[in-house]
Amino acid sequence: MHGRLPESPAPLTQALDACRRRDPEGFHRLRQIVAPPMLATADHFLEAPRQAEDVVHDALLLAWLNAGRFAADEDHPGSWLFTILGSRLHNQLEALTTATPSATRRIPARLQGQALWTLSRDLEPRPPSPSLSDRLGDSLSARLAAPQLPRTPTGELVHPPLYDARLRRKMLTSRLAYQAKEGFKRRLGRPLEDWLFRRWLAQRSGSHWLEAQGLPRRSIEHALGDRLDLEVNPGRLVRSLSYPDAFPNRAERRKASTLFLWSGDWDLPRHDLVDSSRTRFIRDLWTHRLDPSCSETCRQLERQLEQGRPLRSHHKGMLLDSRERILEYLRLYLLYMENMACFGFDKHEGKDRLGVTIDRHGRLIKTNKGLHRLAMAQVLGLAVVTVRVRSVHRQWWERHAGDARGRDALERVAQALADCAPA
């Protein structure tokens, strides 16, 4: 019967492999094979056909975006695809039954991949409606068009539905300035820092001066690599750092961003992440995920639009000068959250790692890198995220380095990182 799942996993595996290579035919083939049984499965749990189509749209788009994660030698393609469907379906059902997100994320057995895959084979497939087919085609076209547009100043792809040609000049100018700055660092700044750092490691002449200055952060990151990464419960990471409060002097603030050792009382001002604008934005959006137009964020962006000052950001390559673009912007963030909910926190996603600093007592304080992603992990109730130590308080360094210097001091401090916990 038309729409029935194939007995062999080969067609799905081949479709996913084509998606991994960003071949649009792979997505079309995937949609043809699994959209009908996915819709039937979603219909089994949801009363509104439109909601089932929303779930399947997102599940197929997430499969396209994450096809590189599929391992044919470890997973059955059907179970893998329906695991994505189960994650998205779980979030839909949770939104329908509770007003507040759960503190921890746990998908029930009936919504796990293998169970849904088995169930789908007993249900009558439902062909996608013309509107769903159009939405899937538009979503794929947007992803395929992104590489043809100007990139953000730091090199990320824009989301074409939010991009406006009026941003082009500013984006290109900022991109050139960023590349020039990074080129200077790469050709002159970093080699000098690394040369000085190697002298400090060997405790040669000038090493005491370099340590008194604060040691070059990028050189230490290169030397320690993933040893600076710590896994923490995002719900416990509640303190953040305000750079203007920590370093009121702008010159001192700029200098601190290049150093690994921070002296002074920068860790005393207290700022709670629960009250941050990013946390409020993510919580508001997730609470209203069934209809983001009802969120306070949407109302605020619409007020800005009515006042003739729509949100514009050449750093993100977006201009929200219509209600359609506002809703697309909110749906894009919801898709980020659905992606994280399904696949967990990926430290390699995003332009910056989740940065933290270590205070004088050895406690982790969140810096301004990756605040949106941390808020997503907290709202979703993820159990663990990976953070990158960007700097440490000099008092903590001296306590753990003890009488060691150079390479030995760095090794002692690296070993002590594992004992650091959120403030």
Image: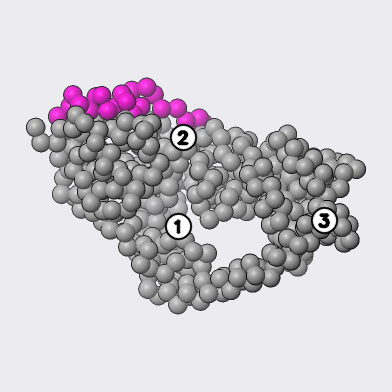
> Is 194 placed above or below 169 here?
above
Q: Nearer the viewer, residue 142 or 99?
A: 142
Q: Write the start and end of the magenta stretch as one range.
A: 101-124
> Is 163 placed above or below 111 here?
below
Q: CA distance from mark 3 to mark 1?
A: 52 Å
The residue lying furthest to the right in this view is 403
Q: Nearer the viewer, residue 381 or 80?
A: 80
Instruction: Tell me the kind of residue under disc 1.
Output: Gln
Instruction: Tell me the kind of residue under disc 2.
Output: Pro
Instruction: Please give the name of the residue rendered at 26% of the width and 42% of the height, measured from the top-left corner.
Output: 14
Q: Residues within 10 Å of mark 2 (few under 14, many from 20)?
A: some
**Residue indicated by mark 3:** 200
Instruction: Please give the name of the residue rendered at 70% of the width and 42% of the height, measured from the top-left corner.
Output: 364
Q: Is residue 114 magenta?
A: yes
Q: Is residue 53 magenta?
A: no
User: Where is residue 137 drawn, in percent x and y?
Assistant: 23, 54
Disc with the residue nearer the chain's start (3 vs 1):
3
**Residue indicated by mark 2:** 101
Disc with the residue nearer the chain's start (1 vs 2):
2
